[in-house]
């Protein structure tokens, strides 16, 4: 049983009053402090839309009413499609989905406890693996192909995704030319530019720089992607005590303002552009200034971010499920489970980085994708909650079985056992004797075996004609 | 036609449907004949009872066992299938003699004195019935002497004793002793099971076998049947 798109929202770290105060502060920041915008194209668009622009400081300030008007133009729901319709997701409301994230430079190998540079081949193999892991609903391109020159990175990353999984593909992008090539490729896969807009098989990410800054490259990318009508995430990555106030509330103000800057820009380019409000908010270790990916505060911030997105009626991209551990140990498990669970229970629409990432998000790991798939299965079961009705209360059955009876042989048990209880795909529930008889394996060993089997078993490829055309017309793809 | 009925019996054993009112695993099966109705029909059609048992019931149960091994099926699935086979066997038993099939034997089951726990024993009962044994369940909190009396009257090939508590497992030993004192010990093979007991404990009290769970209990009885 695959659980996805279920309604979260039972966990609410912010009260309504807190949400209102954060919103008021965000509006004050947008109106009084403003953003530094380094893209000429973006600057001009903000100016045309009625922002006060200080050309000398490259500063953009928007009146509160204008800001609210632009935010209100963004659609409350965004559909992300897979090559197979069963993988389509509708982000918005408090529906919960989880996916991979990126972009890691290394691959960790638990057998040797070493990491190595990630290659294009790794990306293809991970795409094949994720295609088979049911609790990972979306595929965000998780690794960087280190052996390729930057001009070839975008096309090869997206081709690796499209050619190895039928789940929706999201990815960070690196060059404007790369974006254009990727869009051409996606149009061929979808059938045409119009078909791609109707069924977006891919989506992209344009990061702002916290606090309150948009760089030239990403500003241009956001404008280009929005013009094409391809769904775009505008996440912000404020770090407590470094790029935002150290307090969680202060971090939320920066995250919300930064992400809204991107959202507003897309609506200026084209009202109604599908855009996703996003958070990569977390804290830093103030003894080293290391970015933290496994802190409990990251879970809190992203759960609160889901509430802010719901407040603005915007689909939400959250960050959760990572660990700072260097190996697949207990820390790796508890950190990943903690933030995934907090985000999901808060109703975060797309929890990205939810599988496969470790060590400050620098490193991906085959085994961890499989382990996190199990965590996400349990998390989604928690989101589903407890259904109470006459059938589940089972008074008639209790009366029939009576004192001292048993429920093992009851039809009611068979009817509900698969639906009511999460069925593990990896966890060990054997007795010690059985576990020892099967080799006494640690979970990462079992995960490795499963990963190798899933990658080897079945391979998806783009339809032959489409594949051939892409290879012929898009340059730089390494097949 | 014969083949159709047999394969329907097999399929409904897998679905764990005793009668037409049972839902089974797949959608939309309620109202279609279950193992009971199908077996009645097969008998009425004069289909060879050996085919009904071997190709229908036993083969179905074997497939259920495979699904259980593959973790596709759970214990409640297994029990539902065993119940369906047990119900069919009850219908077939009066006809076994004339078709030349030897019944598989009789098993007495009891939870021993002082112990009210009987879920495990009841599961063993369903599984044994499903494997074609005749089962007489004496219930729980059974005095050694009551069990001895029942063995004398029922004359079973096997006696299964169950206990969940460390404080009551000693009553298994007392029951076996009572059997010896009454001169019946050689007439019946004694199998024990329950959370606190073990293979070693079974040997130490002079039992003939030990089942760590319902399936083991069945396997042990099967192996003792063939010796």
Image (cartoon, grey):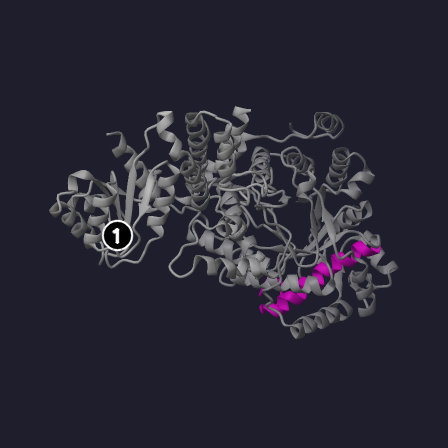
Name the spot of residue A438 as percent of width and height, x first: 35, 38
Q: Is-magenta flag for residue A15?
A: no
Name the spot of residue B195 as percent of width and height, x first: 29, 51
The answer for which chain carries disc 1 is B
* Residue A214 visible here: yes
Q: Residue at x 53, y 30 (%)?
A: A457
Q: Residue at x 50, y 28 (%)?
A: B6
Q: Nearer the viewer, residue A139 or A217?
A: A139
Magenta region, residue range: A239-268
Q: Look at the image and tell me in which quarter the N terminus of chain B lies.
A: top right
Left or right: residue A206 compared with residue A330: right
Q: Nearer the viewer, residue A388 or A314?
A: A388
All told, the count of numbered labels is 1
Left or right: residue B151 compared with residue A87: left
Q: Nearer the viewer, residue A303 or A382?
A: A382
Q: Look at the image and tell me in which quarter the C terminus of chain B lies.
A: top left
In which image quadrant can residue A52 be found?
bottom right
In the image, residue A184 above or below residue A205: above
Mark 1 crowdedness (10 Å alpha carbons): few <14, some 14-19, many ≥20: some
Name the spot of residue A174 as percent of width and height, x first: 69, 43
Residue at disc 1, secondary structure:
loop
Name the spot of residue A270 as percent of width and height, x first: 84, 52
Left or right: residue B90 compared with residue A21: left
Q: Main secondary structure of the magenta part?
A: helix
Q: Is-magenta flag for residue A263?
A: yes
Q: Residue at x 62, y 62 (%)?
A: A9
* Residue A435 visible here: no
In the image, residue A308 above or below residue B36: below
Q: Which residue position is annotated with label 1?
A: B196
């Amino acid at each position: 049983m695959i659980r996805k798109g279920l309604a979260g929202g039972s966990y609410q770290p912010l009260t309504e009053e807190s949400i209102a105060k954060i919103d008021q502060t965000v509006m004050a920041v947008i109106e009084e402090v403003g953003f530094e915008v380094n893209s000429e194209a973006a600057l001009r668009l903000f100016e045309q839309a009625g922002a006060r622009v200080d050309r000398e400081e490259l500063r953009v300030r928007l009146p509160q009413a204008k800001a609210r008007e632009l935010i209100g133009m963004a659609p409350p729901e965004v559909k992300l499609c897979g090559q197979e319709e069963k993988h389509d997701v509708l982000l918005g409301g408090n529906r919960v989905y989880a996916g991979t994230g990126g972009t890691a430079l290394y691959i960790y190998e638990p057998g040797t406890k070493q990491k190595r540079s990630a290659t294009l081949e790794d990306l293809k193999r991970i795409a094949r693996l994720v295609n088979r892991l049911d609790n990972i609903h979306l595929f965000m391109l998780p690794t960087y192909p280190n052996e390729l020159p930057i001009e070839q990175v975008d096309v090869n990353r997206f081709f690796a995704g499209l050619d190895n999984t039928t789940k929706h593909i999201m990815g960070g992008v690196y060059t404007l030319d790369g974006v254009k090539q990727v869009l051409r490729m996606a149009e061929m896969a979808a059938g045409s530019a119009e078909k791609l807009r109707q069924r977006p098989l891919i989506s992209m990410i344009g990061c702002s720089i916290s606090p309150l800054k948009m760089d030239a490259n990403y500003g241009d990318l956001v404008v280009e992607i929005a013009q094409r009508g391809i769904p775009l995430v505008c996440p912000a990555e404020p770090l407590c005590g470094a790029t935002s106030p150290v307090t969680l509330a202060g971090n939320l103000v920066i995250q919300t303002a930064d992400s809204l800057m991107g959202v507003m820009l897309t609506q200026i380019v084209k009202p109604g552009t599908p855009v996703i409000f996003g958070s990569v908010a977390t804290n830093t270790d103030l003894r080293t200034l290391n970015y933290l990916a496994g802190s409990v505060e990251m879970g809190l911030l992203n759960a609160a971010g889901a509430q802010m997105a719901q407040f603005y009626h915007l689909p939400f991209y959250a960050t959760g499920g990572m660990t700072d551990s260097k190996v697949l140990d207990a820390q790796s498990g508890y950190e990943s489970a903690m933030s995934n669970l907090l985000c999901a229970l808060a109703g975060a629409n797309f929890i990205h980085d939810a599988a496969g990432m470790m060590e400050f998000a620098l490193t991906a790991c085959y085994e961890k994708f499989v382990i996190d798939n199990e965590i996400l299965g349990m998390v989604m079961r928690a989101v589903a909650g407890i259904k109470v009705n006459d059938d589940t209360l089972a008074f008639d059955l209790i009366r029939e079985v009576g004192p001292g009876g048993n429920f093992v042989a009851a039809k009611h048990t068979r009817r509900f056992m698969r639906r009511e209880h999460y069925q593990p795909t990896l966890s060990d529930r054997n007795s010690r004797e059985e576990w020892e008889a099967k080799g006494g394996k640690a979970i990462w060993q079992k995960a490795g075996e499963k990963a190798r089997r899933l990658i080897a078993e079945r391979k998806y490829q783009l339809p032959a004609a489409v594949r051939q055309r892409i290879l012929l017309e898009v340059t730089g793809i390494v097949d | 036609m014969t083949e159709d009925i047999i394969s329907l019996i097999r399929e409904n054993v897998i679905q764990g449907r005793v009668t037409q009112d049972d839902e089974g695993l797949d959608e939309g099966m309620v109202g279609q004949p279950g193992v009971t109705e199908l077996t009645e029909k097969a008998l009425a059609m004069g289909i060879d009872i050996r085919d009904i048992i071997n190709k229908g019931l036993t083969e179905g149960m074997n497939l259920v066992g495979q699904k259980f091994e593959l973790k596709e099926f759970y214990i409640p699935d297994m029990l539902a299938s065993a119940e369906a086979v047990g119900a069919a066997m009850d219908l077939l038993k009066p006809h076994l003699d004339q078709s030349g099939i030897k019944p598989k034997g009789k098993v007495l089951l009891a939870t021993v004195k002082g112990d009210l726990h009987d879920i495990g024993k009841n599961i063993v009962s369903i599984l044994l019935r499903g494997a074609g044994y005749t089962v007489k369940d004496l219930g729980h909190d059974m005095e050694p002497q009551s069990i001895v009396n029942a063995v004398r009257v029922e004359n079973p090939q096997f006696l299964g004793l169950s206990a969940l508590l460390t404080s009551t497992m000693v009553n298994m030993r007392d029951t076996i002793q009572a059997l010896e004192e009454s001169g019946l010990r050689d007439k019946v093979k004694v199998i024990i099971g329950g959370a606190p007991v073990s293979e070693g404990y079974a040997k130490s009290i002079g039992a003939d076998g030990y089942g760590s769970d319902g399936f083991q209990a069945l396997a042990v009885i099967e192996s003792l049947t063939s010796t």
